Image (cartoon, rainbow, N blue to C red):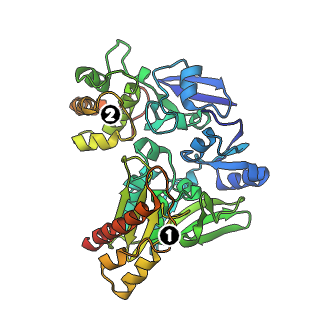
Amino acid sequence: MQVSITVNGEQRTDEVEPRLLLAHYLREVRGLRATNIGCDSTSCGACTVIVDGLSVKSCTVLAAQADGAQVTTLEGLAGADGELHPVQAAFRAEHGLQCGFCTPGMVMAAIGVLADNPDPTDREVREGLEGNLCRCTGYHNIVRAVLTAAQAGPAAGQVPQAQEVQA
Amino acid sequence: MIPTAFDYVKVRSVDEALAALAEHGEDAKLLAGGHSLLPIMKLRLAIPTVLIDIGGIPELSYVRVEGDEVAVGAGTRLFEIERDEVVRAEAPLLSHVAGRVGDPQVRHRATLGGTVAHSDPASDVPTGLLALGGSVVVQGPAGRRSIPVTACWTGFFETDVAEDEMVIEVRVPRTGSSGWGYEKFTRRENDWAIVAAAAVEGRVALANMAGTVVRATATEEALARGASVAEAAALADQGTSPSSDMHADAEYRRHLARLLTRRALETAAAA
């Protein structure tokens, strides 16, 4: 079947099998490998991307379900000049990562948290990231990074290309 | 993990969905948010040969007050139910249990109809619905019919919804002024309930104490007789048949059912 999906502002039409998962579409068909597949069972959140303004786990969405959708992956966050998205910059400033495997999903989920709640408390950040697992950091620096990103204002809860993030 | 191959049919209306169900028969499954179906397809516990995608049917996504009930479309996503002002005001227990499912990313995809049709005994939303009362509206070739929530979930992953029918709507009584409680015991916040208890207006429902969500009828009867919360809650596990697994043995689940029922009833009474 054919799907037409806009990823990071670029629309393309591809022939795919109906059973192709969005995570595999992004990595194998579009060549965008920032989106990691960790547990492959909707638990760890490493594959989180933004689809039509909502954070989702792309290991549990078919590419077919995203036909016609706007998708943003980690690769779509930084500006053309390399300027980091406020959430990326905050993860860097606060050292919100160690091995980095969970980081793309954490950053995309954090954008979703800040879209929903631009000024979250520590607890609200932790609850908002409950679907993302990190096996290195103990989460403290990740939470600090999201709180730091919130100080950058509304841009921290937005993705550059598409429409506004809802949640 | 990759599902077995299937044909994919996207439908835009209930009529199209029912026609596709009729055409493809028992080999077809309806796909809404896919957050119960796709994981079991990836594990090859389900191997449908046709998926009928009802995730884009606009007429199935709504919240309406109709008389003394709130009607919620089956395609409404759980995060929408969690936040909806009408649901929060008129059926706050439903809003709460929708917000206790999985994590934000899951609630962005999962639908009300999907969690009803999946019939997992550990599931938050059916537990809340069973305590609230009300009904599940389904539609098939013969038209629409209403299934009381007490008759909806018939077994583990089994419902009263026939193979040629689909869930259209859930209707719950307006309970906005009544106290309610929901107690869910998990090891991690985004896990399934090891046991959960929902209480509102003297009705109590339990998650994961049998093959389906169940009402704590002995507790309800005791409350109706005027028993104290503590006395009634001590009967919560009567008539249940909890399983033992890696998370908890059956006796511990019985303890949790009594404890969580007491806490849920106390919260409901304090409101």
Near-viewer residue (A18 or B189): B189
Near-viewer residue (B189 or B237): B237
Q: Quadrant of the C terminus of chain B?
A: bottom left
Decide: is A53 above or below B171: above
A150 left or right of A136? left
Using the image, tell me which numbered label, if any, was put on residue B240.
Answer: 1
Residue B182 appears in the rendering: yes
Across and down, in percent, residue B15 comes to 69, 55
Count of numbered circles in the view: 2
At label 1, which amino acid type do we have? Answer: Thr
Q: Chain of mark 2?
A: A
Decide: is A46 above or below B196: above
Distance from label 1 to label 2 (Cα)?
A: 46 Å
Q: Which residue is mark 2?
A: A157
At label 2, which amino acid type do we have? Answer: Gly
Near-viewer residue (A111 or B203): B203
Disc 2: CA contacts within 10 A as few (<14), some (14-19) or many (>=20): many
Query: In the displayed image of the protein, which residue is found farthest to the right?
Result: B23
Query: In the displayed image of the protein, which residue is found farthest to the top?
Result: A81
